[in-house]
Image (tube, rainbow, N blue to C red):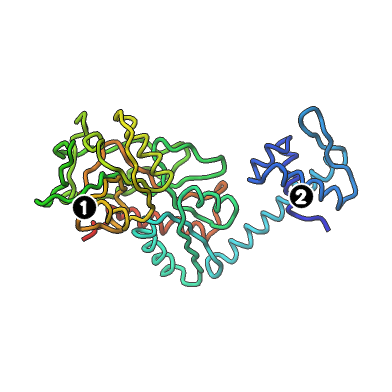
């Protein structure tokens, strides 16, 4: 019996005209595609591909089987979609991956909403940072990945569709001063005013940002710098020790500081927002955290100053073109409903 996975590989090679492009479409490695082709040749006893210069081309037998493979794969996919639509949300499982501060704020509310509306649907939750969440999405281990991107983040691969949820401004986190305001450092500007980044989401993102929320700690509790202040909060703390977070956050911090003309002295690295804020409160350094992280946990010994021009954009990522399976559609709806209620309450 012919293996459906190998037929899918042959169909992709026929569509794309090369092993490299087929591997990219399927999110396989090139050796994996070649291995499946070799196995399919062994199963059929026919030579299906042959070298042509630097590439390959289908033999007559390969073209014959590829035509059937495209038809078979299409029928299998159609049957799967029809069955999913028939079963609908009366049973089944949907899997969500999300980064820590999303799971500490809006994701549980979305999960609860989904469970109330569809009690027979089983929901799986995994905590992971965006790069790994996207790998899990491509591999089919999760159905939706809640991720964040900065304006300087590299575009995602083809096949990833982004649904915009909300914007999350960044804040400089410093030791709280004796009067309840951010403490001064050897080079500190007086925090005043506020600024916000209004950049558009990347191409392909949806929906209209006017329907989406914006996260952040209560403005009454935040120090704020004028957007036209040439010194700004980052430059004012250029001589401080810095605490960096995940790879994507660290890269964004380095880029922000580089734009201000300095390289931060990173003394500590941690993804744990509780540990990071404890270090700041103890006077061991300063850091930059997004609003959601401060909503998930706010140490009483820190003060925050909004960083003008630093906003991360939060999306629900799905793989492939619509229509999505009913369970995925329901999860996306729950996420959008929950995040439209932003801004969320600031931590006590």
**Is 56 left, or right, of 168 in this rendering?**
right
Figure check: 117 above or below 347: below
Query: Which label was assigned to residue 279?
Result: none
Residue beneath disc 2: 7
Whether label 2 touches label 1, CB < 8 Å: no
Please state, as top left, top right, bottom left or bottom right, where the C terminus lies in the image.
bottom left
Helix, strand or loop status at disc 1 = strand
Residue beneath disc 1: 302
**Is 91 left, or right, of 115 in this rendering?**
right
User: Which of 292/211 is in front?
Assistant: 292
Rendered residue at 17%/45% (across/down): 223
* Number of other residues with Cα within 10 Å of mark 1, as a class: few under 14, some 14 to 19, many 20 or more: many
Helix, strand or loop status at disc 2 = helix
- Total numbered labels: 2
**Is 191 left, or right, of 44 in this rendering?**
left
Rendered residue at 41%/48% (across/down): 246
User: Which of 182/339 is in front?
Assistant: 182
């Amino acid at each position: 019996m012919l293996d459906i996975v190998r037929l899918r590989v042959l169909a992709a090679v026929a569509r794309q005209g090369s092993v490299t492009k087929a591997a990219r479409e399927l999110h396989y490695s090139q050796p994996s595609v070649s291995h499946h082709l070799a196995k399919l040749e062994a199963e059929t006893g026919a030579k299906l591909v042959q070298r042509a210069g630097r590439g390959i081309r289908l033999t007559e037998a390969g073209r014959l089987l590829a035509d059937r493979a495209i038809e078979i794969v299409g029928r299998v996919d159609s049957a799967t979609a029809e069955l999913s639509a028939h079963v609908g949300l009366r049973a089944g499982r949907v899997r969500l991956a999300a980064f820590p501060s999303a799971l500490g704020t809006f994701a549980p509310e979305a999960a609860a909403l989904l469970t109330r509306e569809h009690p027979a649907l089983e929901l799986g939750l995994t905590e992971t940072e965006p790069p790994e969440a996207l790998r899990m999405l491509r591999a089919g281990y999760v159905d939706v990945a809640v991720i964040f991107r900065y304006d300087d983040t590299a575009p995602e691969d083809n096949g990833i569709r982004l649904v915009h949820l909300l914007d999350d401004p960044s804040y400089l986190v410093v030791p709280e001063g004796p009067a309840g305001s951010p403490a001064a450092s050897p080079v500190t500007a007086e925090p005043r005013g506020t600024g916000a980044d209004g950049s558009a989401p990347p191409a392909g993102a949806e929906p209209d940002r006017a329907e989406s929320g914006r996260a952040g700690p209560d403005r009454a509790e935040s120090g704020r710098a004028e957007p036209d202040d040439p010194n700004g909060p980052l430059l004012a703390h250029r001589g401080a020790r810095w605490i960096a977070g995940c790879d994507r956050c660290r890269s964004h911090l380095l880029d922000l500081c580089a734009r201000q003309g300095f390289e931060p002295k990173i003394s500590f690295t941690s993804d744990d927002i509780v540990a990071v804020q404890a270090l700041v409160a103890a006077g061991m350094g300063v850091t930059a955290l997004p609003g959601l992280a401060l909503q998930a946990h706010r140490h009483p010994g820190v003060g925050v100053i909004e960083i003008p021009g630093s906003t991360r954009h939060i999306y629900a990522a799905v793989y492939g073109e619509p229509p999505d399976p009913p369970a995925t559609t329901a999860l996306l709806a729950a996420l959008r409903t929950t995040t439209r209620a932003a801004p969320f309450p600031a931590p006590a």
